[in-house]
Image (tube, rainbow, N blue to C red):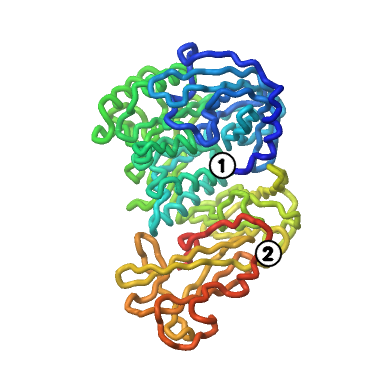
Amino acid sequence: MRNLARYMFLAILSLLIIPVVGVSAQGTDYIPFPPYHVEPINKILHPRLAAPLFANPGDTFKIYVSGDYSVSAVEILDNVLGYRYGLEIKGVASLTDDRDGAEITDITVVEVSIPGDVVDGLYDIILSTSGGVFREPNSLRVLSSYPDMYVIGHMSDSHLGGWGGKYLEAYENFDRAIYTLESMGADIIVVSGDFIEQNKEQGIKHIMDLLSNLRIPFTVAPGNTDYSFNTKGLYLIEKYLAPDSSMVYMGNALIINIDAETGDISQQVVYDWIESTLERYRDISLKILNSHYPNWDPNVVSQKFIDFFRGMNEKYGISLFLNGHIHRNSVKVSETTGILTVTTTSTEVAPEFLGFRVLYGYADGSVEVPDDTVYDVKKFYVRYSQINVFQSTGQSALVVNGLSEEVSLRLYFKLVDNGLELLLNGSPVSEGVYRFSDDGVNYRTLVLDVTIAPGEKRVYVVSQGKDESPPTASVSVDGFKQYYYLIITAEDEGTGVAGMDVFYSLDNETWIACEYVVIDSWPYPTAPRDLPGFYYKIVLWDYSGNSATIYGVYGTPGEEAPGEGGPAGITIDLNILAIVGAVIAVVVVVIAVLRRR
């Protein structure tokens, strides 16, 4: 998240206190979320990054904040294109949530009005309060009118956050799926759980960084691997993304995400909240449910769960139930609940690997799930050379179309603005360029529409001025059965690492190309395990043609004199040591992302 110091002066305006009127949960008809277990990192309870609100210019809506505050200003910011607006504050009230299980009981409710001239976009909500500035990214989607058809991207089971080869692949697959759906212009991405795995918050932080700068909305229901953090009291989904159960109001459509990671909903208050939400929006025809376990399988969901949602379908009419967990694709009407149910393959590692699907929901409640909109992210994808979150001055995108038809995509190059001329594949570009400032930092976005023929691969390289800085890398060596394998972390402050070659040597003069061996589902460069030690050489290059060579030694390969790599033990070329620039966030690209074998 970006530093919010720019807004702190607004919070000091404590004289602009709007009168607060006290109410309680029992005195209100509806709260747009079940009871919270932990406080979100940004204090905002609704709308959220993974439970956004759709609205039209001129609409009035409510923002729910953890705590009791006065509010002096509310802004919204499209943090990709830079549009910024102040919202009119219609009223501020205090709310006590006394529902069973509520850990967040003191709530401030801010009613605001969207100006009539707001440009369509996805906006951060920024509140200046007596307690500080609170900012929830990508939580408000403004549309001039609600569409008759929604394009929905469905994913499941990314299992981010662990370490080892298959987890590196999981990160790459997730990023490819997210960025491809962004470029396809989906109206929303729906994920059916199992986001995170191992290493506590590593995976969820990666997701939040990526999603906070995405151009399309996103929503999620927890899965069983996410639930393991709830049992430890961490509630990582709730802390970073959205309540464990949540809703997305889309004007003429509704999505309800269901916390059913144990095969049931743990609290009656959540069942009650789901029913009250369906009742509140009963006139909306397109109602979509989302939970992790397949609702058609009585072996993984409880009879209470089945009976409840069968009843909800009979009473309110459910258009679609999205599920995950089984890591494969299926489309069928559930024999238990009677609801059309779709599951989608994992973006981790799955026997049947595809990645994500696209389906279509209509305002009249009908749904289309075409067979030809299931996509394998190894065959059709957008891959940026580094995480596309305004952390570098250059960026490159590889677009691969392994489909049988032409595709039209919209790419977003999100850069820190260094004031130099913007270049696309070496030529100046001015169309589709957006510049804005946030927190005293200047940003620049290039929006590029491209058409890719069947079977075509194309690279788009965007820089500000000529990129003359070579990439760098750090190396560690580990052992696995008969192999030593090299774990390489490469980075580039310009247009991104394009690839690398890895060699080993016994005498530091004769170099042998490392064999790539699949270890824990991922190919690593390796040397034979029976060596007492070895020298290694890594040649890497970026998308602007800059290259660097890194030398090092592992173990005791012998007493031979050092070769061109310099003294044994040196791991970074002296040329690389000269790469010391201004404070620029450098994005790490793990060897998993860089493999060329």
In the drawing, what numbered circle is on residue 249?
none
- Contact, CB < 8 Å: mark 1 with mark 2? no
Which residue is most to the bottom? 560
Which residue is most to the top? 27
Q: Is residue 153 in view?
A: yes
Q: Is residue 240 above or below residue 307?
A: below
The percent coordinates of residue 504 (x first, y second) are 44, 78
Q: In the image, 463: left or right of 499?
A: right
In the rendered image, the quadrant that contains the N terminus is top right
User: Which residue is depicted at the point 75% across and 54% down?
Assistant: 419
The answer to which of marks 1 and 2 sits earlier in the sequence is: 1
The residue under label 1 is which amino acid type?
Ser
Q: Mark 2 = which residue?
A: 467
Q: Mark 1 = which residue?
A: 212
Q: Is residue 453 in view?
A: no
- Residue count near mark 2 (Cα–Cα under 10 Å), binned few <14, some 14–19, many ≥20: many
Q: Is residue 357 above or below residue 547?
A: above
User: Which residue is depicted at the point 47% across and 22% down?
Assistant: 105
The percent coordinates of residue 411 (x first, y second) are 61, 49
Which residue is most to the left? 299
Q: Identify which residue, 106 or 58, lies in the foreground.
A: 106
The residue under label 2 is which amino acid type?
Asp
The percent coordinates of residue 59 (x first, y second) are 63, 22
Number of numbered labels in the structure image: 2
In the rendered image, the quadrant that contains the C terminus is bottom left
Dot 2 lies on which element?
loop
User: Which residue is depicted at the point 55% across and 18% down?
Assistant: 94
